[in-house]
Image (cartoon, grey):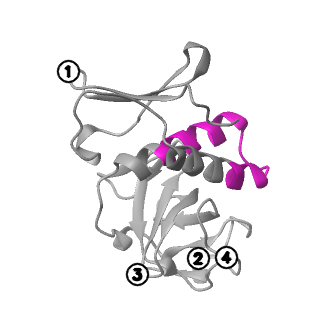
Amino acid sequence: MHATQQWRWVYDPDQQQLQIELEQGLVHTAPYKASRLVPLHALNATFSTEDAANFQSFFDALDEHHRLSPQTILEAALNHTIYQKFGRPQMPQSWYFQTADVTPNYPLTVGTLVRLNSGLADVLCAICTTDGEFVECMVLADKFPLSDIKTLSQYDVIKVMPNRLQSAFADTHQQPDNLRQA
């Protein structure tokens, strides 16, 4: 899949809904609430070169792993592009996650797969941004319970410290003593 010049950003302020119009009448609606995005006004604009590059690099990185369905890769890449352009900056929320005794031994770049463990669930995520001090991760599972009252949905993005990241390629049935609560 490649972004084309026909792809458009469309925001309807009455519905408070951001969409990407793809070719052939296909539309992708942003899963993010308006409060998670920068303030938007009526919008109908084509994808920029930067938007297309953000989409393509994330799509290609996820596609390399052969662990995700084509539908998940496409939706994750579209949502990554939305979040990079319109997402509000967020504070880290590392306290929800267990600290990994051993962090991944592979480069942590945009599109890299990692796991986060909340103690209630251990799910696959993709790195959206990294600045050395913090990493923003996109949830690829259907849902991710963080506590009794907070659950992340698929494609939600959360900012954490890198020491919370676990290898996506390790055995997912690790012994409890491999992890310690933060």
Cα–Cα span, label 3 and label 1: 42 Å
Residue 148 image offset from top left, x and y in percent: 32, 54
Q: Nearer the viewer, mark 3 or mark 2?
A: 3
**Sequence-wise first label, 3 or 1:** 1
Part of the protein shown in magenta: 60-81
Q: Is residue 123 visible?
A: no
Q: Amino acid at mark 1?
A: Asp
Label 2 sits on what residue type? Pro
- The residue at which mark 3 appears reads as 182
Inspect this view and state whether residue 150 appears: yes
Question: Which dot marks residue 176?
Answer: 2
Residue nearest the viewer, comparing 107 with 147: 107
In this view of the protein, which residue sits in the foreground, 136 or 44? Answer: 44
Question: In the rendered view, does 178 fall on the left or right side of 160?
Answer: right
Residue 14 is tagged as 1
Residue at the extreme top = 25
